[in-house]
Amino acid sequence: MNWKLAIILTASGILAALLAAAVLVPSWREAVQSYVQQPGFEVLATAEGDLLNDGSLCKVIKYKGSEGIYVEVRKLHTEIPEGERASTGEGDSTLVDRVLLPDKFDGQFNFQGHVTRLAIADIDDDGSLELLAPTFDRDLVPHLNVLRYNATSGRFEFFTPPKGK
């Protein structure tokens, strides 16, 4: 056998063994992932609606950051036309609020026949939309975080709907 081919085959075998070890050994896998992954956040879901109840369109972004799961609400500079949903396009936006959810693991739930990670709905039939963001705690117990806009404080607050709704 040619000595160059033997060197290439040997080097390929060593490289394959190192890659397999990096995948199979958890501490090595985490080290490789932290080296390769970009710091920042991972977008989990988005939704749009009139969460400020003033006719403006808001975009909600549920994302995983370094400290946990966040929900960020941004007011888009696009008005909702009467009786229809506006297209967001490529417009500017203003940050309304950013909320750190109490649980560390993202969740999903069935909402109106669709599995989703984020939803907007009027769950208490008062004419105002609420934000629904499911999560799991460290014991994998599911929680549905309901957030409602408080116009007085200008922030989104955790909301518990009244019993019977």
Image: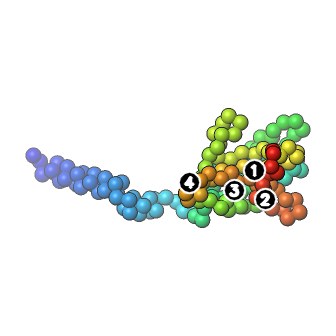
Does the image show residue 78?
no
**Discs 2, 1 touching: Cβ within 8 Å:** yes
- Dot 4 corresponds to which residue? 140
- Mark 4: secondary structure: loop
**Considering only order in the chain, which callout, 3 or 4, is on the residue closer to the N terminus?**
3
Where residue 77 sits in the image (x, y, percent)?
82, 51
The three-letter amino acid code for the residue at tag 3 is: Val
Where residue 132 sits in the image (x, y, percent)?
72, 49
Mark 2 or 4: the one toward you: 4
**Discs 3, 2 touching: Cβ within 8 Å:** yes
Distance, label 2 to label 1, CA atoms, is 9 Å
- Looking at the image, which residue is at 55% across and 59% down? 138
The three-letter amino acid code for the residue at tag 2 is: Phe
In the drawing, does residue 89 fall left or right of residue 35? right
Mark 1 or 4: the one toward you: 4
**Considering only order in the chain, which callout, 4 or 2, is on the residue closer to the N terminus?**
4
**Discs 1, 3 touching: Cβ within 8 Å:** yes
- Looking at the image, which residue is at 77% across and 40% down? 87
- Dot 1 corresponds to which residue? 131
Where residue 36 sits in the image (x, y, percent)?
45, 59
Mark 1 or 3: the one toward you: 1
- Dot 3 corresponds to which residue? 71
Distance, label 2 to label 4, CA atoms, is 25 Å
- Looking at the image, which residue is at 71% across and 61% down? 99
The three-letter amino acid code for the residue at tag 4 is: Leu
Distance, label 1 to label 4, CA atoms, is 21 Å
Other residues around mark 2 within 10 Å, as few (<14) / some (14–19) / many (≥20)? many
Closer to the camera in the image, 157 or 78? 157
